Image (cartoon, rainbow, N blue to C red):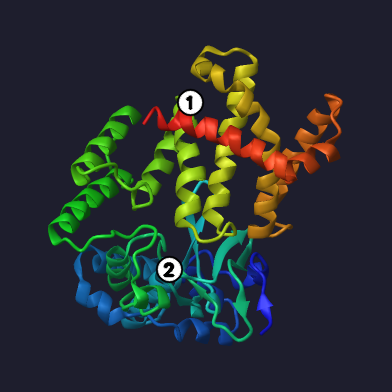
Amino acid sequence: HVKKRPGRDITKRNAKRIRQLGIPSNMHLLETNQITENQWRAFLGMESHVEEYKAVGGSLWLDIEKNCGEIQAWTGTEVDKDTLQRLTCSFFINSMSIESPDGNVIGSSLDPDAAMMNHSCEPNTAFFFEGHELRVRSTTNILAGEELTISYIDPTEHFDFRHEELRSKYFFECSCKKCEKRVPGPGELKTRDPQFHKRIKEAQNSLRSILHPNTQITSIEAIENAVTRISHEGYPEGDWPYELQPMPRVVVALAMAYQDENLPKALRFWLQTCFEIDPFIWPTPHDFRPIENFMKYLGVQGAIANLLAEDDPSVRELQELKSPITMLQYPHIMRFVRDAERGFGKDSTIAGVARVWQLRWNSIVSMQGIDREALVSFYTGKEGKLEIKKNEDKLLEWARARR
C-alpha cells in the first residue's frame, strides 16, 4: 500500500472557506450573497444533536437559547427559532478551537468539510491554524484508502474520562481500536481496584479544578503546594504517575506560571515535561503539543543562559549547570528545527521561528570561530548524541532532586 509519511500536509483550507465569526456571520454572509447556497446547505446538513442538548438542559441549554435571541436581535433574521437553535447547536458541536502557540483558545472555526472528520482516541492526523488556513497534518503512516481521523478530545486522557467527555460533549460512544483493546498504556491506571479508582478519580477532579480558569489563585507557590498535597492524598502508596492526567497539564501550567517569576522553577517543570512526560504520553514526535512545549522550554533555557553569563543573582542556584545548559543550546535548536518542520511543515510559522533561532546561533558560532558544519556533524553522530544525553541527564538529575 502507498503510505502517507508522517508530518505531511493533507489539506489546506483557504481563508474564505473558514468561518471564524460563528453562526451570525454565516447567516449574514448568505443574506448578502458572500457565501453560496451550496455552502449554506452544507452547514444546514451538519449534525446538531439539538434534541440531546435539550435533554441535557441546564446552563448549557440556557446559553444556547440566549445566543439565539442575540442572533435574532443582531442580524434581524427571519429564520425561525427552531432553526436557529439547530444551527447554534451545529456550531457548538462541529466547530474547532483556534489556539495560540501557548495553548490559549482565541477563537472558533467552522468548516463543513473539516467537520466531517471522525474521532479516534488514536488519531492519524492533527489540525492547526496557520494564519487564515486550517491545516491537517498526518502524525503517523497512513495506508492508501485509510480513513483520516482527528481527536475531538485530549487523547492522552485515561479511558473513563475520554468516554465521559465524548458522551457529554459529542453524544456518542467511542469504538476506536484503542478503546476496543482497552490495553493499559500511558495515562491509564494499571489496577482494577474500585476503591483505588475512586480515590484517584477524586484526586484527578481536584487537580482539574486547579486548572479551571475561574479558580482563585493566591500565589503560584500555593498552587504548587496544593498539587503536591492532592497527588500524595490520591496516590499515598508512592509518587503520582507523571503520565497520568491531569498531571501533565498541571506541570505545564506551573512551568508557564513560573516563567515570569522564577526561571529555575520554570526550567524544572519544563525539563519534566519535555524529557519525561511528553515522550511517554505522545506516540510520535510529530504531534504538535510536544513541539510547542519544547519551544517554550528553549525560551526559558535561552533566558537562563543569558542571565548565567551576566552572573545574575536570580539564577545563581543554576551556576553548577552553566556548562550543560550552554552546551545544549545549539543541539536543542537543531532538534526544534527538525521537529517543527516535520510536524507543522516547512512553510509554517513555528518552523520559520525555529529557523530564525538557528540562524542567530549560526552567527554566534561563526563569531566564535567554530566550524558550523563540523559542529552539526558532531551532534548528529554517535559521540555527539552521547554528549547531549549526558548533559540532559545532568539537568534532569538536578530537576528530580528538587521535586
Q: Position of residue 384 (x, y in %)?
A: 71, 39
Residue 353 appears in the figure:
no
Q: In which quarter of the image is the N terminus?
A: bottom right
Distance from Cα at disc 2 to Cα at disc 1 = 35 Å
What SS does tag 1 mark?
A: helix
Disc on res. 264: 1
For the residue marked with disc 1, what is the amino acid?
Answer: Pro
Left or right: 276 as drawn, with respect to 145: left
Residue 374 appears in the figure:
yes
- Residue at image point 20% right, 63% down: 192
- Residue at image point 57% right, 87% down: 38
- Residue at image point 58% right, 76% down: 32
Residue most extreme to the left: 195
Q: Quadrant of the C terminus?
A: top left
Q: In this view, does 62 lie above or below 239?
A: below
Q: Which of 371 and 43 is in front in this view?
A: 371
What SS does tag 2 mark?
A: loop
Disc on res. 367: none
Q: Which of 277 and 19 is in front in this view?
A: 277
First in sequence, mark 2 or 1: give its number: 2
Q: Position of residue 394 (x, y in %)?
A: 54, 30
Q: Is residue 176 above or below residue 102?
A: below
Q: Position of residue 6 (x, y in %)?
A: 64, 67
Residue at image mark 2: 152
> Which mark's residue is nearer the viewer, 2 or 1?
1
- Residue at image point 21% right, 52% down: 200
Left or right: 210 as drawn, with respect to 275: left
For the residue marked with disc 2, what is the amino acid?
Answer: Tyr
Badge 2: how crowded within 10 Å, few (<14), some, or many (20+)? many
Left or right: 14 as drawn, with respect to 403: right
Q: Do the residues labelled 2 and 1 touch (CB within 8 Å)?
A: no
Q: In this view, does 266 lie above or below 82?
A: above
